[in-house]
Image: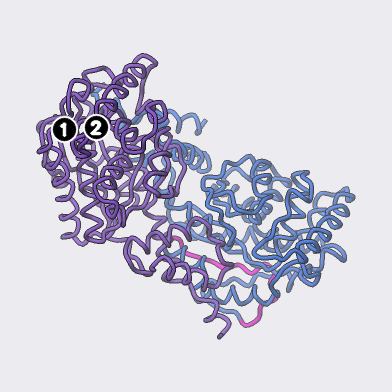
Chain colours: A blue, B purple
Amino acid sequence: MIATAARARLDSLAKPPGSLGRLERLAIRLAETQGRIDPVTTPRRLIVFAGDHGVVAEGVGLWPDSVTAAMMGLMLQGRAGSAALSRAMGADMMLVDAGSKASGLAGAIYRDWRVARGSANLAQGPAMTSLEFEAALACGARAAVEAAQDGIRVLALGEMGIGNTTPAACLAALLTGASVEAVVGTGAGATAETLARKHAVIAEAVARARDLTDLRAAIASIAGFEIVAIAGCIAESARRGITVVLDGFIVGTGALIAQALDPEALRTAIAAHRSAEPGHALVLERLGLEPFLEWELRLGEGTGALLLLPLLDAAAALLRDVATLAEVTGG
Amino acid sequence: MIATAARARLDSLAKPPGSLGRLERLAIRLAETQGRIDPVTTPRRLIVFAGDHGVVAEGVGLWPDSVTAAMMGLMLQGRAGSAALSRAMGADMMLVDAGSKASGLAGAIYRDWRVARGSANLAQGPAMTSLEFEAALACGARAAVEAAQDGIRVLALGEMGIGNTTPAACLAALLTGASVEAVVGTGAGATAETLARKHAVIAEAVARARDLTDLRAAIASIAGFEIVAIAGCIAESARRGITVVLDGFIVGTGALIAQALDPEALRTAIAAHRSAEPGHALVLERLGLEPFLEWELRLGEGTGALLLLPLLDAAAALLRDVATLAEVTGG
């Protein structure tokens, strides 16, 4: 309904129909997420969900998991990429700790809502228990509730967690049905050796997860706390009518979880971009979301979601401020 | 030099090298245009150059040239697409009349610097005289001088002129050496019949222009006032170190003129996007500029250039505000 009304509004404007291409599709999607043809794009917030991953012990990446805490500290200082871009794009920022191993972090934007200090090693057994899975969903929902209380209309979602491309690739394979080969990338850095290990770990974990008959248990066995929290945040944002702008591959797998638990959970979601991570296109296809930027982004931290925010402003301005042809011609 | 320094700065930041993909290339290009690794993106301005075209009498498009004046009026009311998006993207706006047939327009942002009231019909003879060509260049330069006096650091350049895809296609063919087939699109609207006429007119005009030995005379024979003014504005902006963000196909052909007269004129130019107009890719290749958005835009009025402005803010923030890895590790 709203999509049809938004399309009609755009086609009535004093410009050749369709002449703003992808911006018009973004305007329609934005209108859909808010159920109104005059959507609002401020105030807005970046939420970075953080977590650590037991699977790092398997040597699946280049960096030690202490880097998670270091990057979280940099965010709290306002000097990480996410922090710099959130200021530039007019969003405030929250760092929600869903399950990192960090200690000593503090700051007005820090929320220590940890389910545990790092997930278990998914190569050796389930990454988390059922209780932990539900707690991680609740952690994400809580961040959406806080956003709603603060009057936030648009959330940009990002993540920080060394090693989290491994659970993300597991989730992408499990929830899209794609082969492991199709979804394993280098993450934020890998050698041939770490990549081979990562591949083996993922293949085995996904095979075990596919044997589980309970969907929630299967997801919990291969997920990470920040990824599950993202799913909870997306679902709660949908219930509250807050537009959620998804960053890249890892946030996309959080959206896959939300979709698997309830297809209606994607009602307010917009995919900001298609990243350089090879599995992301498959994830987006499964989510049924069109990505708006193809900028070869693979930093994470919500940086790609932030870049779309001013383009949402443009989309909203198009719907709101441009004269109709009828007004111009007096018809 | 500056590109190397900007690349080194980006590679020193606390993030995986290259992980912000196209945003990093945009940051490097922005730094190059200003000759500094801490480029500035405000204050900024959209300039829409307007003009009418005698060739409209040949029936090359769907719309009468009175639409040029109507759209200019809508810009002055702040209700055109360009006006709405310039507000949303934090740019002020100027409408520079390089040669429209409008009458009765007024407003604080209107500059009536007309060379003439519409160009001559390029199907019947030269579109403008040599004197008019030089005057149109000066008109554009004057807009850049005013911007410099106002402290503007970034200009977004756009155009409005019913029929101007015809001179633009002529210029693209002449200045890239491409075939007429490769550069003729539908513009803002065309039927099969108008498209066939447009094609014939362009082929003949380009053939005549190619016979002229004097480059300026050849360009003048097939150009339009707003397009030549854009060339003048680009060249003067380069001299003054103002970053110029180019909109689509038509602005691109203005840049081709500037380049043909002086290759250094593109020193401060950034291509915002690759449009839906088929010849645009060829124009960008000839200009040697990478487009940053592919959003199927074909409205004109500088709308595509405007969409890139907040992404320039992000690029500048990346260079300016993100910590280096050495700062994080204490190295």
- x, y percentage for residue A20? 41, 36
Instruction: Specify whether residue B235 is painted magenta.
Output: no
Question: Image point 18% across, 29% down: which residue?
Answer: B127
Q: Is residue B73 in sight in this rendering?
A: no
Label 1 CA crowd tier, 10 Å (few <14, some 14–19, many 20+): many
**Which residue matches tag 1?**
B100
Q: Chain of mark 2?
A: B
Q: Secondary structure at mark 2?
A: loop
A271 sits to left or right of B224: right
Q: Quadrant of residue B205?
A: top left
Q: Quadrant of residue B281?
A: top left
Numbered tag placed on residue A12 in the rendering: none
Question: Image point 63% across, 39% down: which residue?
Answer: A288
B329 sits to left or right of A60: left
Kindly identify the amino acid type of the residue bearing the numbered disc 1: Ser
Kindly identify the amino acid type of the residue bearing the numbered disc 2: Gly
- x, y percentage for residue A36? 46, 39
Q: Cα distance, mark 1 to mark 2?
A: 8 Å
Locate the C terminus of chain B and report the quarter of the image it occupies.
bottom right
Question: Image point 49% across, 53% down: which residue?
Answer: A154
Look at the picture and state if B311 lies above or below B325. Answer: above
Q: Which residues are magenta?
A: A90-104
Q: Is residue B29 in sight in this rendering?
A: yes
Q: Secondary structure at mark 1?
A: loop
Q: Nearer the viewer, residue A284 or A151?
A: A284
Label 2 CA crowd tier, 10 Å (few <14, some 14–19, many 20+): many
Q: Quadrant of residue B178?
A: top left
1 and 2 marks on the same chain: yes
**Which residue matches tag 2?**
B161
